[in-house]
Amino acid sequence: MPGGIENMNQKANMDQLKNEPAYSIQVLEFIKAANDFCVYLENIDTVEKMQAANYFSRIIPLLYLKASLLPEIKPEDDSANEKFVTQEQYQDIFNKIRTKLMPDDEFWFVDPSSPDTGQSKKGSLAEKLADAYQDIKDFIILYQKNSKSAKQNAVKECSKMFRQRWGLGLINVLGILHTLIFSGEYFDDTVEDFLD
């Protein structure tokens, strides 16, 4: 009889997991893309510029899609929310990306959320990518904590930052990369080399 009670408890725990949005397939799929993105940025100094452009042109749409599908979550305990990426870590990632993409790092864009709509602003690919890295890395580290509240807060905060900050930033990066890659004017490599 004790085995029957144990099996019932395991089934109850599995049912709770199925009904918890923080453990949903949408979150798990985002984690995979998010982790790949962060690891790549941490090692960007080991790849060629065109390889990096190729990677970003493919991971950005995936990240955007997966982040847009994250469920809305109301954490049971808001105090479980934490930030982990330090200013020094952010600066290190920013510098690695900027060094890799120079002289093509800076670009002009229009920010639709700005009160100066229609006014162009100068942007940096490295800054937009580092902003996304910071929020996504914070998500990954917080999600790894062994608490449901931490996981709930990780999803909620990442989704919020996607909507407020890094989602549009990555869209800007993707547009600039498309122009840089396919215009043939900026990168030394040919488009054919890039597509291989």
Image: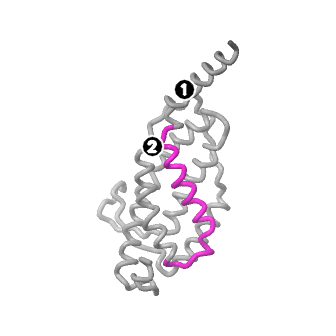
Q: Is residue 169 left or right of residue 117?
A: right
Horizontal side, residue 196 vs residue 153: left or right? left
Q: Quadrant of the N terminus?
A: top right
Secondary structure at badge 2 equals loop
Query: For the residue carrying disc 2, how many other residues have a C-alpha within 10 Å: few (<14), some (14-19), or many (20+)?
Result: many
Inspect the image, locate mark 1, and give the three-letter code of the amino acid beneath it.
Gln
Quarter residue 45 falls in: bottom right
Q: Which mark is residue 32?
A: none
Q: Depth-wise, is mark 1 or mark 2 nearer the camera?
A: 1
| Residue in the image at 52% along x and 78% along y | 49
Q: Which residues are magenta?
A: 24-50
Q: Which residue is outermost to the left?
A: 118
- Disc 1: which residue: 16
Q: Which amino acid type is marked by label 2?
A: Leu
The answer to if 143 sits in the magenta stretch is: no
Q: How far, Cα to Cα, is label 1 from label 2? A: 19 Å
Q: Residue at x 46, y 72 (%)?
A: 54
What residue does disc 2 label?
70
